[in-house]
Amino acid sequence: MSTEVASGAVVYQQKDGHPAYLLLQSATSDFWGFPKGHLEGDETLVETAKREIKEETQLDVQVDTSFKTYTEYGLPNGNLKQVTLFVSEVPTGVAVTRQKAEISAVGWFDYAAARERLTYDNLKRMLDEANAYITK
């Protein structure tokens, strides 16, 4: 068994005084999640998060490293996947250009709609933690 390490961020913008969260739908399944991807070479988790967000959305972001949330789970191939998410606020109305090969849809969702749209419970928990941090 090997370990796959991924990093990304809960990307959000303020709309009418409340956070709107950016979610991405995988081009190969019905999976909805956050922008994230695998570490490459000797990248740090922050470098990976910024690179993956840029690749998947064309957004140049700053990552807030004072918050992070973590999950790990087993994959069907027997490997362990470790995921760390930070938060990243972007300007309201910023244009998102999806990476067509990997992403079939993007959307901005309020907290309740984002929580409903996320595919897996561990991602919902990560959103809960990020939302608590953002709205404190």
Image: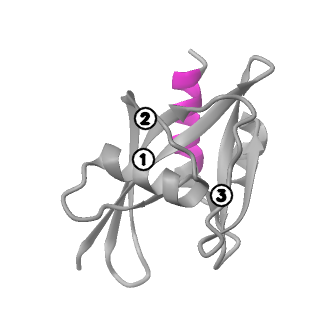
Which mark identifies residue 24?
Answer: 3
Q: Amino acid at mark 3?
A: Leu
Residues shaded magenta: 124-134
Distance, label 1 to label 2, CA atoms, is 7 Å
- Residues 90 and 2: in front is 90
Element on which disc 3 rests: strand
Look at the numbered discs 1 and 2 and tell me whether their residues touch, using CB distance below 8 Å. yes
Residues at circles 2 and 3 in contact by the CB criterion of under 8 Å: no
Whichever of callouts 1 and 3 sits on the residue coming sooner in the sequence is 3
Which quadrant would residue 32 be assigned to in this image?
Answer: bottom right
Picture quarter with the N terminus = bottom left
Q: Which residue is mark 1?
A: 50
In the rendered view, tell whether residue 78 sits above or below residue 122.
Answer: below
Taking depth in this image into account, of 55 and 107 the one nearest to the observer is 55
Q: Earlier in the sequence, mark 1 or mark 2?
A: 1
| Main SS category, magenta section | helix
In magenta segment, residue 63: no
Instruction: Tell me where residue 107 appears, x and y as whole percent.
Output: 75, 50
Q: Nearer the viewer, residue 94 or 10?
A: 94
Residue of label 2: 63
Q: Residue at x 51, y 34 (%)?
A: 88
> Could you tell whether 18 is left or right of 34 in the image?
right
In the rendered structure, which amino acid carries the disc numbered 1?
Answer: Lys
Q: Position of residue 91 (x, y in %)?
A: 65, 29
Circle 3 Cα neighbour tier, 10 Å, few/some/many (<14 / 14–19 / ≥20): many
Residue 3 at least partly seen: yes
